[in-house]
Image (cartoon, grey):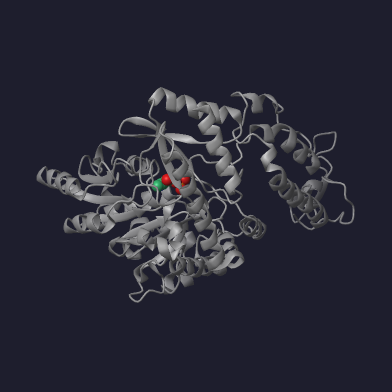
């Protein structure tokens, strides 16, 4: 938007094409510069009135979408290339009214949407959206600020620091992760994703174990090793690749056959072997709620072994961590007080639109030293005073959106009791579902399911299990995904959409039972 001299008219894009018919700029000469018509007038920006009108239409569109979401097949039923084929080959030469965008949203885009907010979406892990988060995000877009430095928008930094301290309190995380913690060294930051969190944890770990040498010298070949259970998310391997260690630096810790959590004795063996061969253990990643099965690693034991060798312990609690808002699930934080860093994603299961990963460090020094480069154009008095946080030093990109607004909006709208109710409801629904699966002898549960993820398979074998999933997904009535446990296919049902009710989980079971 910009102030528009044609204010009061509703016609969009009032600007005549630059150059008229001759192709020459029409304009006058001012202080030696030729000012064209299109330079003097805003380039067809949406006026405040147009923005108001279309903004209301968009909010109505979203509200209608949520009201009719159950009428759509959960999984998009289009063939590859179908959406592109319905789009014009070339961009428009002249601006179009926003109604045209909304019309195409219905006609072209919606058929290609897999409805993540559908109450029968049970695939992957959820990616919660909620009214307050959407509005918070819209406000962030409206303000359009860049919070890379404290000085570039002090409120963006200070709200983020404050909300992450609130969030640590809501989850019962240790004091050492808070920016106002007793030793004053910790703190939280919003990363885009848990994958970013794993990467910056690795960079901080490399900084610490190398005594700061990895920044000027790089990581060399085969010098450092990283450890994580075979159940851990692939983001850790990706972090190794991005950091230049390569996938070959990653060691997979064996898991316990029953709990599927990392075996500390095996970590000890892996580290001993690396040390004997001259490699430095840099990072151990413990999962709290592994992607495939929801397995929870013994954080304290893994941390003790990591620290014996100077390695960094990062906890990836991307999906499960937020469940610690519920006091009876605080066991999820067992051992976290020994971690160097921790992350969980409000954008998965806590009502906050993507992207919002809450990442905490116990000692921000290693992180900031690993990532800080201060070119002249970013120098400013606040940074040099040392009295402020500049979040650009806590993440990979320089720029950053004002994501704290949506988390702030969510926490204020729901309150701690609303967040607890959200988690408890899903855990209860998942327990009902697991009981049904457990009572049908054709099925078997393959992993513990204390939260809202149930992993199970058909005893008839891999082909039958996979075929069952394909039939369910093709029906459009529910969507679930699979994983591999003990080398065999298993299905995952992750209950987590804000709209999911008992009847949706019951309908899923009915579908599975009759299709099996
Ligand atoms: N870690 C775990 C345990 C996950 O389950 C996932 C995704 O499901 C990730 C990391 C990656 O999440 P993100 O998309 O935030 O990088």
Q: Residue furthest bottom?
A: 182
Quarter the N terminus occupies = bottom right
Above or below residue 314? Residue 290 is above
Give the left or right position of residue 293, taking residue 278 as reference. Answer: right
- Residue 371 image offset from top left, x and y in percent: 37, 56
Residue 352 placement, left or right of 197: right
Residue at 46%, 49% in the rendered image: 431
Q: Is residue 475 above or below residue 507?
A: above
Residue 320 visible somewhere in the drawing: yes
Q: Nearer the viewer, residue 452 or 241?
A: 452
Q: Position of residue 349 (x, y in %)?
A: 51, 52
* Number of numbered markers: 0
Which quadrant of the structure image shows residue 302? bottom left
Q: Work out whether 461 lies above or below 183.
A: above
Residue at x 34% of width, y 59% of height: 341
Q: Is residue 281 left or right of residue 57?
A: left
In front here: 252 or 40?
252
Single out the residue that lies furthest toward the right: 9
Q: Is residue 97 visible?
A: no
Q: Is residue 85 above or below residue 104?
A: above
Q: Where is residue 294 drawn, in percent x and y?
A: 38, 46
Single out the residue that lies furthest toward the left: 276
Residue 130 x, y percent position in the rendering? 62, 54
């Amino acid at each position: 938007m910009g102030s528009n001299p044609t204010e009061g008219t509703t016609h969009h894009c009032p600007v005549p094409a630059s150059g008229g018919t001759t192709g020459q700029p029409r304009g006058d000469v001012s202080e030696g510069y030729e000012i064209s018509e299109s330079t003097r007038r805003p380039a067809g920006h949406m006026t405040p009135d147009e923005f108001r009108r279309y903004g209301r239409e968009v909010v109505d569109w979203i509200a209608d979408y949520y009201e009719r979401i159950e009428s759509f097949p959960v999984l998009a039923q289009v063939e590859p290339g179908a959406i592109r084929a319905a789009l014009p080959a070339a961009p428009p030469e002249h601006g179009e009214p926003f109604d045209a965008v909304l019309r195409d949203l219905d006609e072209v885009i919606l058929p290609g949407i897999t409805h993540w907010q559908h109450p029968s979406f049970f695939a992957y892990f959820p990616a919660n959206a909620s009214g307050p988060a959407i509005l918070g995000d819209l406000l962030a877009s409206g303000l359009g600020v860049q919070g890379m430095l404290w000085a570039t928008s002090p409120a963006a930094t200070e709200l983020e620091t404050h909300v992450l301290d609130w969030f640590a309190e809501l989850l019962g995380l240790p004091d050492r992760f808070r920016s106002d913690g007793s030793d004053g060294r910790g703190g939280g930051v919003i990363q885009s994703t848990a994958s970013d969190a794993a990467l910056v944890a690795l960079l901080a770990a490399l900084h610490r174990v190398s005594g700061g040498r990895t920044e000027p010298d790089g990581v060399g070949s085969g010098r450092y090793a990283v450890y994580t259970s075979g159940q851990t998310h692939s983001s850790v391997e990706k972090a190794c690749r991005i950091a230049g260690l390569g996938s070959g630096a990653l060691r997979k810790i064996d898991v316990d056959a029953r709990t599927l959590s990392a075996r500390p004795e095996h970590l000890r063996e892996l580290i001993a072997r690396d040390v004997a061969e001259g490699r430095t253990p840099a990072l151990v990643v413990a999962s709290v709620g592994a992607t495939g099965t929801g397995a929870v690693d013994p954080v304290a034991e893994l941390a003790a072994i990591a620290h014996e060798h100077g390695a960094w312990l990062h906890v990836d609690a991307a999906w499960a961590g937020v469940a610690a808002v519920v006091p009876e699930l605080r066991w999820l934080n067992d051992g976290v007080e020994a971690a160097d860093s921790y992350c969980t994603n409000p954008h998965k299961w806590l009502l906050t639109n993507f992207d919002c990963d809450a990442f905490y460090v116990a000692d921000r020094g290693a992180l900031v030293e690993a990532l800080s480069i201060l070119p002249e154009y970013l120098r400013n008095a606040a940074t040099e005073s040392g009295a402020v946080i500049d979040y650009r030093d806590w993440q990979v990109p320089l720029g950053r959106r004002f994501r704290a607004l949506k988390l702030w909006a969510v926490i204020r709208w729901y309150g701690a009791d609303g967040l607890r109710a959200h988690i408890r409801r899903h855990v209860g629904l998942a327990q009902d579902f697991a009981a049904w699966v457990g009572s049908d002898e054709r099925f078997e549960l393959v992993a513990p399911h204390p939260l809202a993820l149930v992993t199970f398979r058909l005893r008839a074998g891999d082909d039958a299990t996979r075929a069952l999933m394909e039939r369910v997904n093709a029906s459009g009535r529910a969507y679930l995904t699979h994983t591999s446990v003990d080398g065999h296919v298993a299905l995952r049902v992750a209950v987590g959409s804000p709209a999911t009710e008992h009847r949706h989980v019951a309908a899923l079971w009915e579908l599975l039972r009759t299709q099996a």
